[in-house]
Image (cartoon, rainbow, N blue to C red):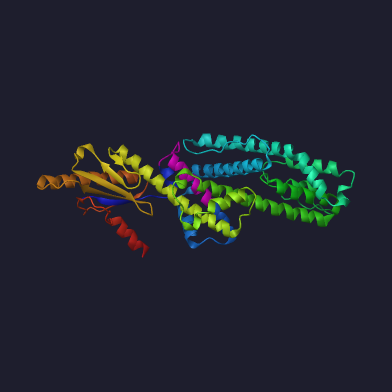
Amino acid sequence: MSAGGVVVLPMTAVLAAGAVVVLTAAAAAALTVWAVNQAAEAALRALGRVGQELENEAERQSRAEIAAMRWPHIAAEVVEVNARIRMLAARASRTGVVVAVPAPLSLDGCTEQEAVQWTARARVLLSAANDALATARSATERERLTAALPATVSALPDTAEALSRLQATLRNRPAAPSPTPTRSPGRGPDVDAIVRTLDEDANENDRFEVLEAAAKARTGGSAFTRQLQMKVAEVNGRAGRRRLAAQLAGVLEEPVVVRTPPPAPWTGTAAKLRAVVAGDADLTPELLEEGAGAARWAEGVVRANFVREAVSQCLADQGYTVDGSSDLHLTRTDWQGEHSAEVWIDENNVVHGRVVRDHDVDGDEAVMRDRDRCDDFNADLAELAHRLDAEVVIDHGHVPQRRAATAPETHVQQLRAREAR
């Protein structure tokens, strides 16, 4: 008879096994959230705050050969560019300057080639928009700098020209991060070279702090030059944290996540992250841990949605009529209303299924139909597992029961419970 479970592999492995060309909405959301979680966990590892559970998960993902797959790397690029777009939009809104900010990309319906091409175009557009924003504010920025500089610096006849040149250095710096300036024998690093290492996503306050330090270093000697280097390093760290906050905030705004109220620890996390993106707060280690926890919860939500969609599509392809958005109710015309099947997904994303009898019928023919339909369902579960490149466990001793209000524990659940002990 038939009852069993399909143990689905990590989402990225499923994508690779299915040779996905165009992402569905559920797959796109799952892949996007996965990519952000990798960034968040890398940041936590840098803080030394990643637990053994996360290390074990990273090892499992490594065994799934994620590094050999293209989609995860493409998704990571898209997630980063979308975060930069969000940051630039926040800067433009805050300053009141209208610039052509590119629209973020949703991976829903994208091919690999489309995503790669969009990423390349978006990076160019981001650089152009950054330049436009800096140019529009250059005069105001110089006035503010002149007022803030010590009189010994602002009174110099070439200060205005020097400030303009420093602004031009920022506008003309390469999009990719410049290498750390090296010290020449007998002299300190060049001020312009240090300024060129400023993160492209630094906001207006960041720029002001760096330009102010650069103007002082221009005439103040090696001590001021070292202060400039430290200031650029500090500002670049802030910009990087804002970028990560933008990625985490984007995860919590995925449509399927928004439809699911977050548990109590993360009810206000999205608002805190948006404040970081806006430049009103910093991504502290505590907020990073909170945001990473919220992102892991969101990954569970979108992954369950992805698995449910993938399973529903496979079952529909096998000839079942699939009803339900959480637990799935399956019928077939050739079962003539006598049997149906129940499929549900547990908290570990194990897909469980069983044949149930909807009408009591006695006799040897009914017993034979029970056996035949369970055998058919067994075969369909095995095909489902093959399509998802997953493990399948079949309980051949299951006998169809009348439909119950709650699904009984299946054989695979019992196995998983024993493994957990």
- Residue nearest the viewer, comparing 353 with 134: 134
Residue located at (19% from left, 46% from top): 358
What secondary structure prevails in the magenta region? helix
Instruction: Answer above or below: position of 299 versus 313.
Output: below
Left or right position of 243 against 144: left
Q: Position of residue 357 (x, y in %)?
A: 19, 47
Residue 178 image position (x, y, % from top left)? 70, 46
User: Among all residues in the image, which is located at the extreme bottom?
Assistant: 421
378 or 202, which lies in front? 202
Magenta segment range? 18-38
Report if residue 335 lies within the magenta region: no
Estimate the x, y position of residue 396 in percent, counting from the top left: 23, 52
Q: Dividing the picture into quarters, in which one does residue 14 lie?
A: top left
Quadrant assignment for the C terminus = bottom left
Please name the residue shown 20% across and 44% down the image: 339
Callout count: 0
**Residue 190 seen by the camera:** no
Outermost residue on the left side: it is: 363
The residue located at (64%, 51%) in the rendering is: 280
Residue 15 position, x and y percent, is 43, 43
Instruction: Judge whether 67 appears above or below 125 on screen.
Output: below
**Residue 2 appears anywhere in the view:** yes
Residue in the picture at 70% in, 53% down: 233
In magenta stretch: residue 21? yes
**Side (left or right) of 258 relative to 278:** left
